[in-house]
Image: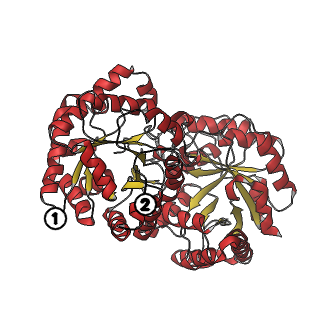
Amino acid sequence: MRIEDFNERVRQGIIVADGAMGSLLYDAVGQQCTVDELNSSHPEAVFRVHHAYIEAGAQLIETNTFGANRHKLAQAGLGDRVAELNHRGVKVAREAREAAKHEVLIAGSVGPLGIVRQVRALPHEQMVEIFKEQAGALEERGVDLFILETFSDTEELLAAIDAIRSFSRLPIVAQLTYSEEGTAFGGTRPRDTWEKLKEKNIQAIGANCTVGPQLLLPILQELAACVTLPLSAMPNAGFPQRVGDRIVYPRSSPEYFALFAREASQLGARILGGCCGTMPEHIHAIAEAVAKLRGTESGKGKGGASGTAGKTEVVEVAERVRRMASREPESKLWDKIQAGKFVVSVEIDPPKGVQIDRIVEQVGRVMTSGHADAIDINSGTLARVGMDALVLAGALEAHGFETIPHLTTRDANIIGLQAMLLGAWSIGGVRNVLAITGDPPSVGDYPETSGVYELDSIGLVKVLARLNQGTDWAGKSLGGATNFTIGVAVNPVAEDLDRELRRFEAKINAGAHFAMTQPIFDPEHWENFLKRLDGKVPIPVLVGLWPLTSYKQALRLNNEVPGIVIPEAVLGEMEKAGDGARERGFALARNMLDWARTARDSGIAGAYLIPPFKRYEEILELFR
């Protein structure tokens, strides 16, 4: 395809691209060391994915070659198959196009080389050679254009562009992946990306992956303010979660993606598709929205397969020492729960830098208000680098504030987790811990790194229980024992409620003392969950409450964040409130807090409150 033809094509209207490839292939053939190899081993499965997106309305499909470069393939022992796997990827895509009822463009998908620290160690010339080898194989078999996608490092993206332009005159769509804050690797803003790319011979610029539709819009808006090229946009379905060995994305509604298509087109997007977690139904919704836009808004615009290792299930080993007698936890929080007091915790995020003065000041105001009993601390939220929750908890404990730090199994193996817990108990004074599995790295600033996940949250509860009995996991005596109050997460509105109930029971059997729910927005959600528990919850529960501040926020949470369900009635109230949405959101949360106080007989022992936008003192408005 000539560059002139591509430019004319995007001037005529929006091109609808396809969606996720890896997740559909996983469903079809199971986990593989690399999905690129499926072009050879299971070409019919790859064909079916292409065909499904074409049937949904995609006018552009990407070859299944995102990771088919020598650097990545070598890690799977396939480094000598670069040409073969790229050739076969194009061949399967061409076969799918031949079966299509409408015109379809084939884009050669080229992704980054590997984890950032490895890539940065490679000279520019070496990166160019690796990209040139892959791109050459793709062009040789007949792609119409190239899509460079999910790059987090602009310098690496530049190397890929230089590689293609060293031999090819096909159109290039260049996309970076940006965090929730709108930055790529090294704090690069969209406008910074344009400054580096504007002299390059590319035909479209945009963003894909990491964030969902709503968070991608501000990135497009910043690009639209400075670029002179058409924009491309391919968001994730939302924030993923780890389920067993899989990374699972929320089921954002097709209508939500149709809304995104309309808003993105107004910002100048001329290529619209989806990334991780998106399905043919999302692309169909985009295609229908684009069809309605043709001749109106659309004419006004400007011109991975997961490499995470399998989880090691924690299995009880033979007892090597007699366990210490079971004891009641000794934290003040547990004492209050046992005394029948309605307890309240306020959730905070650790700072991303080295200063804690402001956090201590904010927490101090919350705790001295008399309305809060503890502070629970997120751990590596959205897989971003921030201060360690256990360490911050120790600092807050030193100021006299009781804490519930979250601890994830993403970032350390079983040895490291035990070491951290022993230090938190003995030195930090931490007495409560919430055991969670943690967000996968793909949502954060290091999308190409792999989480550890040697344990899941159930395994972590078992580890905590063993420490409370005076031994490490291997059965070696500690010369003393911790006595943590062990908390776990539970989601009353989980999509797979049977699985959630099984895991909840396993956490309780492993030694959990209390639970904290995902945020809920309707008492009926808890009551329905309670019925599944035969009317009685086995351990005390703190219900999560989140004051909504806008209709847009509510819409995004409902569609993009796994495990959060906001009833249509609440969405309607937030939309109707208009400029008064924040006040209405707090009023709804206040009603939920009042309900929780009266639901003691249904297992509710308290609530944890999520302040809006890290303005922690504002949560006190719920008590007015």
Mark 1 surroundings: few (<14), some (14-19) or many (≥20) residues within 10 A:
few
Corner quadrant of residue 372: bottom right
In the image, what residue type sits under mark 2?
A: Lys
Q: Secondary structure at mark 1?
A: loop
Choose mark 1 or mark 2, whichever is in front: 2
Residue 450 visible in image: yes
Quarter of the N terminus within the rendering: top left
* Position of 587 relative to 466 (above/below): below
* Position of 238 relative to 198 (above/below): below
Q: Residue at the location (47% across, 39% down)? A: 452
Quarter of the C terminus within the rendering: bottom right
Q: Indicate which disc, 1 or 2, sits on the residue closer to the N terminus.
A: 1
In the image, what residue type sits under mark 1?
A: Lys
| Residue 79 image point, x, y percent | 24, 29
Q: Which residue is mark 2?
A: 300
Q: Which residue is mark 1?
A: 101
Mark 2 surroundings: few (<14), some (14-19) or many (≥20) residues within 10 A:
some
Q: Nearer the viewer, residue 12 or 471?
A: 12
* Position of 298 relative to 526 (above/below): above
* Position of 376 relative to 298 (above/below): above
| Residue 570 image point, x, y percent | 60, 76
* Labelled disc at residue 307: none
83 relative to 187 in the view: left or right: left
Q: Residue at the location (67% across, 34% down)? A: 479
| Residue 39 image point, x, y percent | 19, 45
Cβ atoms at labels 1 and 2 below 8 Å apart: no
Q: Nearer the viewer, residue 218 or 373?
A: 218
| Residue 249 image point, x, y percent | 43, 57
Residue 480 visible in image: no
457 relative to 35 in the view: left or right: right
Corner quadrant of residue 143: top left
Q: Secondary structure at mark 2?
A: helix
